[in-house]
Amino acid sequence: MRANVIVFPGSNCDRDAAVALQSAMSAAGNMMSAPKMVWHGDSELPESDLILVPGGFSYGDYLRSGAMAAHSPVMREVVRQAKGGTPVLGICNGFQVLTEAGLLPGVLMRNASLRFVCKDVYLRVERDDTAFAGHYKKDQVVRIPIAHKDGCYFADPSTMYLLENEDRIAFRYCEEDGTITDAANPNGSSANIAGIYNETGTVLGMMPHPERLIDPALSGTDGAKMFSSLVEKLH
Amino acid sequence: MSGAANVAAETPALSEELVAEHGISPDEYERLLKELGREPTLTELGVFSVMWSEHCSYKSSRVWLKKLPTSGPQVIQGPGENAGVVSLGDGQAAVFKMESHNHPSYIEPYQGAATGVGGIMRDVFTMGARPIANMNALRFGSPSHPKTRHLVAGVVSGIGDYGNCMGVPTIGGETNFDPRYNDNILVNAMCVGLVDADRIFKSAAKGVGLPVVYVGSKTGRDGIHGATMASAEFDESSEEKRPTVQVGDPFTEKLLLEACLELMNEDVIVAIQDMGAAGLTSSSVEMADKGGVGIDLDLDRVPMREEGMTAYEMLLSESQERMLMVLKPGSEPVAERIFKKWELDFAVIGKTTDTGHFVARHNGAVEADIPLPALAHAAPVYERPYEKRDPLPTIAAEDVTAPPSILNALERLLGSPHLSSRRWIYEQYDHMVMGDTVQRPGGDSGVVRVHGTNKGLAVSCDVTPRYCAADPYEGGKQAVAECWRNLTATGAKPLAITDCLNFGNPERPEIMGEFVGAIEGMAEACKVFHFPVVSGNVSLYNETNGVAIPPTPAVGGVGLIADIAEMSDIALKADGDVILLLGKETGHLGQSIYMTVMEDRLDGAPPPVDLASERIVGDLVRGLIKARTVDAVHDCGDGGLLVAIAEMALAGKRGVALEAPPEDLPAHAVWFGEDQARYVVAATPDKVNTIKDVAAIYNVPVRVLGTVGEDTITLPGEAPLPLGMLRAAYEDWLPRFMTRG
């Protein structure tokens, strides 16, 4: 598969995302080509089967998280390919960039605690019929880490209605047994939203970092299934 | 050069007040005049004041630092460069250092701590290494002091925001609360980087006529005289020093990191030095001096953030995220292209010369022209008088009140400021970025995998200030021993340490006595463990209105785990496992957490450290881990044996049924005594005899403590303590403290 990882100045999970994808490709015997790192200043983006917008602090997030990156030359190409149906995965800062670029609705605000938080959280899988979640089961509970200061998802009531009604919520923060509670919500997100899809289910933005739990040595492998699903479905 | 005559002719004599304001004593000024052979310009006075400051010159500590062992077969680079380097085998090396940012962090906690983290990371990537792990050691005042909460909040978010943005995991550290830090908090930051052993960059600018290149952020007025501030005591007016605190920009530092590593792939750098304390002055003086050349700077070419800065201000600015490099001639375009790509400033601001002088020109005038040896080597070195105080008597366990219930006492200890969970702190640090954190904060050491290999690097920061205050020598030994133990408990082979020596005013003999004692203790321990010091930093004058901090020689150690499959951690793994104590029990309660929490006093001698038995027990434990005979290991430290057991239970989410302790010691001394050279291990029942047999060979005492299971901690004759209650006490204190009021 041809995968492109977008690198902004200040991206810092670009390597981690590439490693996760690469190891899923190796595990599947798909050694075709390593993920390609694409610099933000490039106005050309090779045609791809998957675009990854990684975590980090693009442009230092000194304006609004993801706001500057959304106006990078390469993002025009990302938007064009996404609208043509190319799957796009935005993780953490990548999610913020995708909302700022208009590929996903809503906004990621400062955490309710006002503090950065890095820890494992439980997510309830809300859909398993996409290329991203094909190796999960609906209502399955997975453990994936978060690491952000601006992860409080907010959207206006009509957008929230659409997201719920069109089944576009990808993951919700939950307890270990899958119940959705305020205590399990690490950042104050509306409806415990941890990730959402676009209308076609081909663009996913999520605050948790699946690329960080891909290996038993890292104390978990729940994240690896997202990459193995992408490799299988998009090969 | 023609500069000197011009400078002298225009220079009026400087007033005594002005000289004193620069922290230069009358004797030192005499020395300066002799070295220079004339009156200095104001700019030159500024340059001397920073280069001769305690912070840059180590004038009070230098003679004693020589006592520390600094070599060993694993050492690639000892003290003297930006950071120390040890071999990890396979052509790889770890680069690491710890540094203080105490004075600025007290004045402005967020920026002070943030720039401390930025500075230590620059020290590491200056050597060509990619930073792969950060740690920090923090000392705050009493929780009841009105400023403590504000300082904790500011320091932690400052460290977090900087390290998180850099994308380097912060994998652990330690935090103490003690009223003796009320007016002088300590912020010590450590960074570990990874480099190919044959691609290490150094700071000696060998060669004449080479371009001197400035890269990174622009220069502003922030941080002027930061090094001088860090070399003086505080008083009531200290808060007015806020403008001397630098302002951090982690985004620019991230770009600087990537740009520097990219340039290091080209064969163009002769020497590189970060602009830290004393900024442009210190970096250029050090590079030229080490290379045995002169250096000529044209300050008109320095990228500026503000207008109208004088040469004095430019040379003394401590604006962050800047680097100075000496390049091979003709390679400027290669370097410029890379720095422009990363949208960083790039300017050729001077050249190396054969004059042996440091020369700075500005607006067509020579503002400074100083022979380099006067700055680098003629700085005064003091053999300050010192007084060691008499050791305190050892307190008998019987003279410390026994609690009505051991398990209730355990709950109180774990719910105290001293032993409660630091989760509120470490969850604000990204400890998983880079995808190689194989042991997260909360255990004995943080461990990161060496990317792309099965090797692990264990890192731990340690010192027990209350022991050091009671007995600097034993405390110095204990700091090194505890670090060695924490690395050992993961299965790592301890390689080397960096240190951060935080003390009061060295001009007072009793403080100097603490310094000397601690160094002697550390040196002794380092020798026994073959655990050399490869880098470090000294922070003196940590006192306010004549009241000093407890001596705090923080130690940051690095150890190598050959295969992370053979790594150990503190979490109990399986019901039915047997837990055992390895090491000798004496029930030492003097200076213990038990004494502090239960009796609100700290008395007596600290636990003595028998280095020979530390070595034997540690080597035994490491062997058991490697042979996979044990499946959980924890060293016995603060709070003693029962606290260690409880921490293992909480981490593993499993209870423990304990057996009655031996009767020759009071029960509270057994459970809460802080005897050194001890580890708690857990193993399946079939391994117990093996452990006993091996320990017998080394003559190490072994005692079966109990069995893993259920979700309570039980002790004969006491009501069971549910883990849930214990966890609540352990987890609640810090978040509750931070959100109160």
Image (spheres, coloured by chain):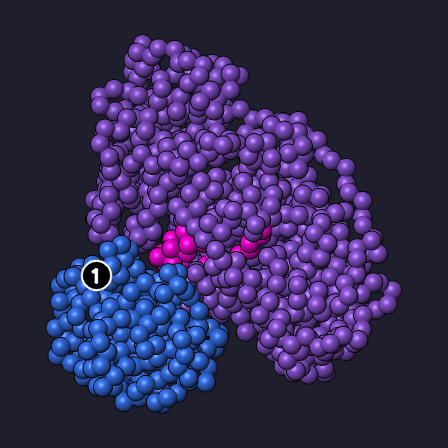
Chain colours: A blue, B purple
Quadrant of the rendering where the N terminus of chain B is positioned: top left
**Amino acid at pointer 1:** Ala
Where is residue B315 drawn, in percent x and y?
A: 34, 30
Residue B363 belongs to the span the image colors magenta: no
- What secondary structure is marked by label 1? loop
Seen in the picture, residue A68 relative to A203 is either above or below; the reply is: above
> What residue is at 29 percent from the left and 65 percent from the top?
A109
Q: Nearer the viewer, residue A98 or B82?
A: A98
> What residue is at 44 percent from the left and 40 percent from the top?
B107
Q: Is residue B181 visible?
A: yes
Quarter of the image where one finds residue A33: bottom left
Give the residues in magenta.
B156-177
Chain of the residue on which disc 1 is drawn = A
Seen in the picture, residue B421 relative to B611 is either above or below; the reply is: below
> What residue is at 36 percent from the left and 19 percent from the top?
B42
> What residue is at 71 percent from the left and 77 percent from the top?
B720
Quarter of the image where one finds residue B678: bottom right
Where is residue A184 drawn, in percent x and y?
A: 42, 76
In the current view of this chain or complex, which residue is farthest to the right?
B664
| Residue under label 1 | A67
Seen in the picture, residue B285 relative to B246 is either above or below; the reply is: above
Where is residue B559 drawn, in percent x and y?
A: 56, 59
Residue B157 belongs to the span the image colors magenta: yes
Compared across the picture, whether B287 is left or right of B672 comes to left
Q: Is residue B446 visible?
A: no
Q: Nearer the viewer, residue A47 or A107?
A: A107
